[in-house]
Amino acid sequence: MQVAVDGPWSPLLGRLTLEAIPYTNPILLFTFAIAATAGIVVVGSVLYFRKVGYIWREWLCSVDHKRIGVMYMILGLVMLFRGFIDGVMMRTQQAIAIGPDSPGYLGAAHGYLPPYHFDQVYSAHGTLMLIFAATPLLTGLGNIIVPLQIGARDMAFPYLNAVSLWLTVAGALLCMISLFVGEFSNATWVGLMPFAELPSNPGVGVDYWMWALQISGLGTTFNAINIITTIVKMRAPGMGWFRVPVFTWVNMATAIIGVTAFPVLTAALAMLGLDRYVGTHFFSAGFGGNYMLYINLFWTWGHPEVYFLVLPAFGLISEIVSTFSAKSLFGYPTMIAASMGIAGVGWVVWAHHFFTMGMGPNLIGFFSAATMIVGIPTGVKAFNWVFTMFRGRITLATPMLWAITCILLLLVGGITGMMLSASVVDYTVHDSVFVVAHFHCMVLVIGGGVFAAVTYWWPKVFGFKLNETLGQWFFWTFVAGSVLVFVPMFMAGLDGETRRLDYLWDTSLRPLMLLEVVGIAVYFLSVFFFLAMIVVSLAKREPAEQDAWGTGRSLEWLTQTPVPFYNFAVTPQVHALDELSWRKANGLEKAQPSTYVPIHMPSSTGLPFIIGMLGFACTFALVWRIWWLAGASLLAIILLVIIRSFDKNEGYVLPAETIAAAERNLSTVSVIAEQSKVLPVGGHAEAH
């Protein structure tokens, strides 16, 4: 039975009324003006340069893993900037609101954000940074690099790969539209109970948050299935399990976490949805439910999710340290064991979030010990990176600077994590900004790893390097900003500053808060250098070599630069773990095949994009209880899936002559473009 909610409702628009648009909020009006201006510029540019058809064919309809990976990363960068602005608002609010009696501006009691708006900001910040920034960035890198490292043409399921992307985009769109239509959740990114239940939170904010996580989680689960299948079934001949590059191994570990952990989140959110929409009481203590059921389910997913994000960053560091030390990675088997160990132990540490919630000493002891055990495989990785650099020919290019900094950040985050694993310390600093600073050190490992990887693999995907000078300016300003923001935060946390307060209750901590604001200003400077690096590099476009850094070791550096849409002209035969290094040692790095064979490639399709947009329409309608739109959208998705199941299009075959011509004259090959003249499927062809 549908639960009745307060306020007006109509059959056409559900709960949606003009009052849902916050046109009286000056902050949101300013934000809308900026977003609208940016949208007009982007759409106007596409129309002016007549690129509508190109964008539809080559990007929105693409099933190429490299284009999908690039789109994942664009989405992640956009959401990273949005989440960064949320963080800026939180810190500037606290820097202005010194004490509960400080003056207020723009209608706020103190500072410039009312408490209700502040709650939405920090809830959005956590959701965006973890689910819609870090996850798409790392997923995008995995999409681009994993098939190249194992010698594959594409992912195992190219169509499903595109569906995964557009479902994630649908979730991100829900978060973005909540800025201007309705509100976002004010129950933190975790969804604290009972505050997220309908009686305590009858607005649409929790619904936006819930459906955004639900639909994007579906996309992440599909992608995890795809990654596992690709690695298991599509490795090049000769690539046994102990010749698989470390980055591909950690993506396997990550995908195993994804395919097992995200269904737990799906189940928890489904029960919350039933509570809010149907009137069940899974999490209502007064009606036989249990608040702790939700929080246990959430963190059963939530802590493996931490390793779901940090493990790929560890893989990125491994690849970069090995390349710029001109050495094989030290302790390769132990790196694999450590990755799988972290993925496994990550399942038995979730209750360290509950040390202050009345657990008995036996449980506290178990989860405290389990949390400390995570430090063992993590330490193995750190020592292996150091031993890889030992006596290596180290080149301090920008990717290597990022990688070394990530190792140092991991030490800080790891040591503070070990402190928090001791319940006596956790009791002292629980719910303080010390915990926030610790967690952000780990997030900075992820962010630094992503920036290192972008700089490292950019020439392979786009054919030219990023500007080294501006890249180093970006690096140093980012590091300086991080130090200025999070060192004072550690200090304030030890002094007792509570997280999630919209004012600074201890006025003596104001100097530390002002230091954080200075750090935020330096962060803005780093954003300028990042954008300048991209713009200047695009303007110069100095072509990169096949092995752009000269010390590449794995298969992706064996392909042409930029990578042609078919990846490899001939499926490579693998002879060693560091295949390119082996070929260099044997004088085979420039060897070309005497003959080519036709290649089977998947066809582009617009169905994944349409399904994603219908998913957005369905979840938006569910947020506002527009039942006819939700039903129509869901029915359309089901019909499209059925139609797709009867589609006999098995792709196309790229003729051997076309491949040979492209390899001779690489200027005719785009990064990832489907050929216009192809053969029908049939006869002998290499599978994609």
Image (cartoon, helix red, strand yellow):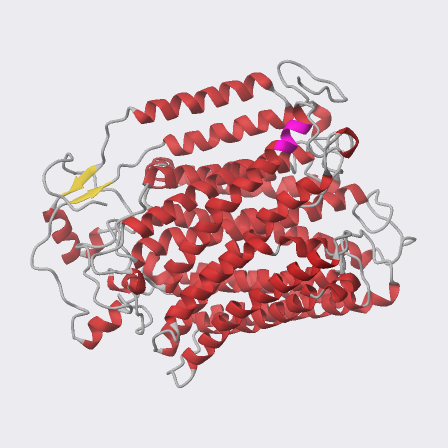
Residue 95: quadrant of the picture? bottom right
Task: Please tell me whether the stretch drawn in magenta is mainly helix, strand or loop.
Answer: helix
Residue 191 visible in the displayed image: no
At which x and y percent is residue 175? 60, 39
Quarter containing the N terminus: top right
At which x and y percent is residue 379? 53, 72
The magenta stretch is: 271-275
434 vs 130, left or right, is: right
Residue 599: quadrant of the picture? top left
At which x and y percent is residue 283? 71, 34
498 vs 625, left or right, is: right
In the image, farthest residue toward the bottom: 391
Q: Nearer the viewer, residue 596 or 672?
A: 596
In the image, farthest residue toward the front: 362
At which x and y percent is residue 197? 73, 33
Residue 272 part of the magenta segment: yes
Q: Residue at x 74, y 41 (%)?
A: 26
Q: Nearer the viewer, residue 227 or 400?
A: 227
Q: Nearer the viewer, residue 58 or 6?
A: 6
Residue 586 visible in the displayed image: yes
Residue 552 part of the magenta segment: no
602 vs 192, left or right, is: left
In the image, farthest residue toward the left: 594
Q: Is 261 placed above or below 239 here?
A: above
Q: Residue at x 35, y 36 (%)?
A: 61
Q: How many marks?
A: 0
In the image, farthest residue toward the top: 11
Q: Residue at x 19, y 59 (%)?
A: 572
Quarter containing the C terminus: top left
Q: Nearer the viewer, residue 84 or 152?
A: 152
